[in-house]
Amino acid sequence: MASEYHTTRRIEWADTDTAGIIHFSRYFCFMEEVEHEFLRSLGLSCIMERDGQRITWPRVSATCEFIKPVRFEDVVDVHLTVKRKGTKSLTFEFVFSHAGVDVARGQVTAACCRIEDHKLVAIAIPEFV
């Protein structure tokens, strides 16, 4: 499994508060979007069918530290790193930067689960991941 991914996001008007500064909640949306892009870049998805199993990655933890404000139309670089690959979970670290300066840092932990009878059952991360 690759352990890093990089992309950018332009801050749109809908991402901001009334002062034109990115709303804190958007960082969580961006982290999820970038995680999905990363998985797709590996030929994976956040919901996959494999060997008769339906596998998904629900979040068990998400945090974000806001360092500096980012404004409408700024372009933010987002660097994802797989911080930890456990037996049943992945922890992703995100660094957001603008003009070479870190503006936020986040972390998301997702558990590998099988969907069984409309319930989630934690499983070991399959070899193909």
Image: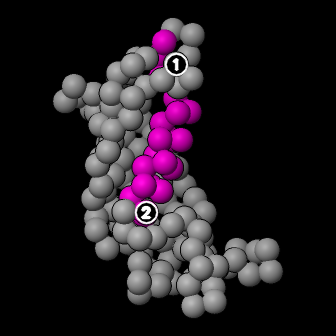
Along the line of sight, the residue nearer the viewer: 2 or 123 = 2
Q: Give the residue at mark 1.
A: 13
Which residue sits furthest right? 117
Q: Which residue is found at the position 41% from the left and 87% from the top?
A: 127
Please say whether residue 56 is one of the residues in the magenta stretch: no
Q: Secondary structure at mark 1?
A: helix
Against 99, residue 50 (above or below) is below
Give how far across and how far down residue 95 sits, in percent: 32, 42
Q: Tell me the quarter of the image containing the C terminus.
A: bottom left
Which image quadrant is residue 46 in?
A: bottom right
Farthest-out residue, top: 19
Find residue 30 and report its horizontal and vertical position in percent: 47, 41
**Magenta residue span:** 20-40
At 33% across and 38% down in the image, what residue appears? 8
Assign the N terminus to one quadrant of the image: bottom left
Report, in whole angstroms, how far the alpha carbon at label 1 lies from the one at label 2.
27 Å
- In the figure, is residue 121 to the left or right of 63? right
Depicted 86 relative to depicted 93: above or below: below
What's the residue type where badge 1 is placed?
A: Trp
Question: In this figure, which residue is indicated by the disc labeled 2?
Answer: 40
